[in-house]
Amino acid sequence: MQRLWSAISCVLLASAAAASSASSQSFENSAIVRTIDLGGSLVHVTTTFAVKALKEAVNVYTITLPEDEIFNTSWLEVKVKGNQHPLTITYSGAPVGSKSHNLDVNLEKPLEAGATINLVLETVQTHATWPWPKQAAQDEDQSLKYETSLFVLSPYNTSVQRTKFKSSSPRILSYTTPEDVQAFTVDNPVSKSGATVTYGPFNNVPSSVNSEFLEQYQQHVVLHYNYDFPVLEVLELKRAAEISHWGANLNIQDDIVLHNAGPQLKGHFSRLQHQSQSFYGRGAPHVLPLFTVQLPPGIRNTYYIDQIGNVSTSRLRAAPSVARGVKNTQNSVMELKPRYPIMGGWNYTYTLGWDAPLGDSGSYDSKTGKYLVSVPVMTEIPGAVVNNAEVSIILPEGATDVDYVTPFPALSNEISTHVTYLDTIGRPMVTFKYKNLTNKHAKPIYISYRVPISAHLRKPMAVTTALLTLFTFAMVARRVDLTIHKMPTRKM
């Protein structure tokens, strides 16, 4: 469960037991539609609940998720359909006798009996797919498998529900046909149309969180489908953001270990075959020759290096800086081409860094005397999940009253001291650790602090002292006679 709560994007109030749990008689589901967008490292799931209140003044709706789905969920959000503001969620424990977990959704206002509302649950699952077969030759296709529950669990009676699987390719190799579901449908329980596989509709589904329903009707379905893009994982991300007031600069450096989680390469790698495939535009889908990332506007001094040295096979299209308060509509785009194509099962370690004007992400409040700077948690690599992330924000030397606001809870956070050149007391460094980050987590951390005037003068004083010490040492050394024995002066 720690995995979900560390990555949840909305306001999540954890509690050991719910103060008040919605009764199964409080609501009924007119319809449930679950749409699963099959991907690689990330699977996006959208579930819409058409809800009808059966009692007066009910304001807590309960959503139930299976235990295996909870384990794979890294991001979760519930909204009223058509509304952009997420609702508050409270974890309310697990129903007795079922391997599932309840989430209580607090509605903005109580519903009267007979009132209806549409709730949209969005989740992002990570590590939910696996390559099958597990190995593929350099010129073979890539296919993945995904497994989930047939029925959407709910503590309420449901009039009708269906599940749709959408693939980026119509080449769906196989899918499970449910058994013993005649109580809920008289038609074929599964159908395929193009790149979409639909399970249902299933009619008059009772409350499904009890052990009797789970043992008799609940079953797992597996889809086997072609996937035409590399399956990417960032095994480790270490981001260091250094704030400099003297240079009015924000330096960000990412140390990344990138992993291709697709089918492992069968046999040996052939450079000739790879170049031939690239020339004719027939590259294997499980091979990563290059990728692009979106960076902030106004960046400069960009560098891209790996364990060998500078990588010149990259291209940057920098966007101009955006004035504070103006919505950014254009990002800098950098195309990264590794030294070698990354095959299935291979890793690639590299460093990407840049400088940005501090004024683009920072401000000063004269009333409180505090600086406020925003630092993104991560830079998204399209389609990739970040398994482990460590974000360190290095403040100016002498900064005090450090405070921060994170977009979602971190696994851990700590304040330490970072010492670098010409520092006297070191710089405060705030470090956050995360797991299983997705594109939904690419949001900023806001950090505020004070820098006294004496701290501003600390750096030039340190430089002056260092230069004065060096100058004094040079003068003294110039006057020291290091001759071992002086030759006597011959008189004429």
Image: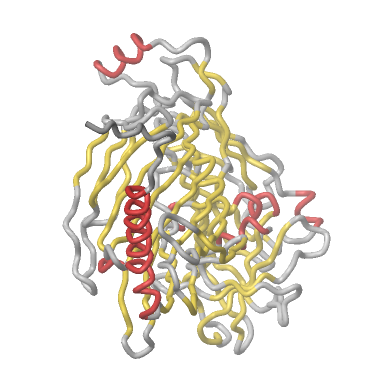
Residue 85 percent location from the top left of the image: 43, 74
* 456 or 105: nearer the viewer: 456
34 to 382, vertically: above or below: below
Residue 461 percent location from the top left of the image: 35, 69
451 to 125, vertically: above or below: below
Q: How is the image coloured?
A: secondary structure
Residue 278 percent location from the top left of the image: 28, 19
Query: Residue 224 appears in which quarter of the rendering?
Result: top right
Residue 123 percent location from the top left of the image: 52, 57
Q: Residue at x 41, y 58 (%)?
A: 422
* 203 or 177: nearer the viewer: 177
Side of 93 relative to 84 (left or right): right
Q: Quadrant of the N terminus?
A: bottom right
Side of 20 relative to 386 (left or right): right
Count of marks placed on residues:
0
Answer whether residue 84 is visible to the viewer in this image. yes
Side of 29 relative to 240 (left or right): right
214 to 485, vertically: above or below: below
Query: Residue 454 appears in which quarter of the rendering?
Result: bottom left
* 340 or 215: nearer the viewer: 340
Q: Quadrant of the C terminus?
A: top left
Answer whether residue 169 is visible to the viewer in this image. no
Q: Residue at x 36, y 12 (%)?
A: 271
* 356 or 177: nearer the viewer: 356
Q: Residue at x 43, y 76 (%)?
A: 449
Seen as rendered, the residue at the extreme front is 492
Q: Residue at x 24, y 54 (%)?
A: 299
